[in-house]
Image (tube, coloured by chain):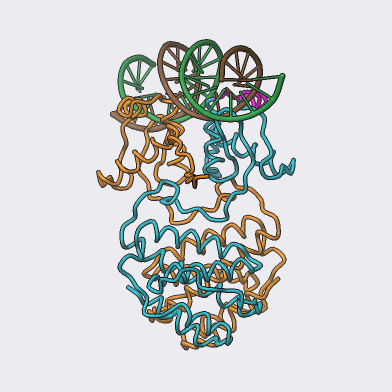
Chain colours: A cyan, B orange, C brown, D green
Amino acid sequence: MDKIKLNPVQRLPRTFEQVSKQIVNYLTSEKLSNRSKLPTERTLSTLLGVSRSSLREGLRVLELLGYLDSRQGEGTFVSEPPPFIVPSRVLTQKLDPASLKHYYEISIMCAEQIVMLSLQESIDNNIFKSKSNSPNNFWSEFAYWIESLSSQLQNPYFLSLWQNTYHLLIENNYFLHRDAPVEINTFVESFAEKDESKLKQLLFTLSRIT
Amino acid sequence: MDKIKLNPVQRLPRTFEQVSKQIVNYLTSEKLSNRSKLPTERTLSTLLGVSRSSLREGLRVLELLGYLDSRQGEGTFVSEPPPFIVPSRVLTQKLDPASLKHYYEISIMCAEQIVMLSLQESIDNNIFKSKSNSPNNFWSEFAYWIESLSSQLQNPYFLSLWQNTYHLLIENNYFLHRDAPVEINTFVESFAEKDESKLKQLLFTLSRIT
DNA sequence: GTCGATTTGTTCGTATGTATC
DNA sequence: TGATACATACGAACAAATCGA
């Protein structure tokens, strides 16, 4: 008996998948900048040789992933996709406590990284001033601080991850009954003094909040 | 002149958006487990009072986000959405060097977190054995080690983030001409000795690879 | 301020491909 | 082999939003 070489069968990608890939290739190859207008759905469907229904399914995918933005009566426009997407946020769906805890730990990891990188790149944070005068709301102040730091960072993906997870927690009222046993000024001052170990200790206490 | 309060105009969500949200609510409320079968497209469209085209656009979104899985001739099935999605990976699209560097830094952050958490949770890693006998390929060994660690971790989201970024880098040949100046055994031994500072120093050298 | 052209949003009917029994 | 159930795909038509003459 001969040896039979078995390869996994290749299925043709569905139409909408081919459509979305082709359009993204078109976007990148033509170097279409932000907000530039795409051809109409009818034009695209004839160009690609597919029906408008299938083309639209492809456009939906790209819109969801942040590559496009369609507006009725106007047209379809190029957009900048984010580096990360959290499914439940796209659908504004509430999450269970376990998942929230997992996202919380991710957000703290990002915060720590942002703070430490800011120290390394010796970012000037003297401009920072507490936004609100309500000293109770630690978390919004903390978020404001983290974003003011990361906006000066070279790598914008840490900010993206932070924002995704932080806003997800906000939307799920995660911080409603979780006040942190620290004040924002403690962070800001430790940062000004470049006190790395103190900052790490503070962030560790945050990570320990249940 | 009176003060005018300007609120952003509220648009009715498009049909496919309402469809995807309703279906997700249906999934969670009915506690439909993995792989259970949904009603047919025709049934769903009549139940929701929308056309099949609009329903399908909603299903596409859910399929892309990982909530569903449609197979021609069989049906549509429930699936488990991942905590994070990287747009360019969904479209198997190649990325520019700058974006890759950003993702690389994210992946290293995850790796460090996974290692440190594994130390804290005193995970037993004695079972680990190098997979291949080619000592050259540091990165695949490293990835194997990270995954063997994080599979025992309480929070699976670190693993998800790691895998997303690592596989994205692989798919873009990021490691092709980037050999690390360390060996995997150095990591494994330092971990066995619970040498935290040594591990941090090793991970720092990884983060410094350009 | 209205009208008409343009463009996306939505629907319906129909045909085809594919898996299961 | 055939029948059934299902997703996939197409095209034509109409609705609604936007913009400019």
Left or right of D1 on screen, residue B172:
right
Left or right of B33 on screen, residue B79:
right
- The one nearer the camera, B99 or A201, is A201
Can you tell which quarter of the image residue B38 is in? top left
Please name the residue shown 31% across and 57% down the image. Answer: A96
Where's the C terminus of chain B, which quadrant? bottom right
> Furthest-left residue in view?
B30
Q: Image height check: is B92 above or below B40?
A: below
Residue B136 position, x and y percent, is 65, 72
Residue A132 position, x and y percent, is 46, 68
Residue A176 position, x and y percent, is 32, 65
Q: Is residue A47 magenta?
A: yes
Q: Is residue A139 magenta?
A: no
- The one nearer the camera, A21 or A162, is A162
Residue A29 position, x and y percent, is 73, 42
> Furthest-right residue in view?
A30
Please name the residue shown 61% across and 59% down the image. Answer: B170
The magenta span reads A42-52
Magenta stretch, main secondary structure class: helix
Please name the residue shown 55% across and 33% down the image. Answer: A16
Can you tell which quarter of the image residue B62 is in? top left
> Furthest-front residue in view?
B1
Q: Image height check: is A186 above or below A178?
A: below
Q: Image height check: is A70 above or below B209?
A: above
- The one nearer the camera, B84 or A176, is A176
Q: Image height check: is B83 above or below A133?
A: above
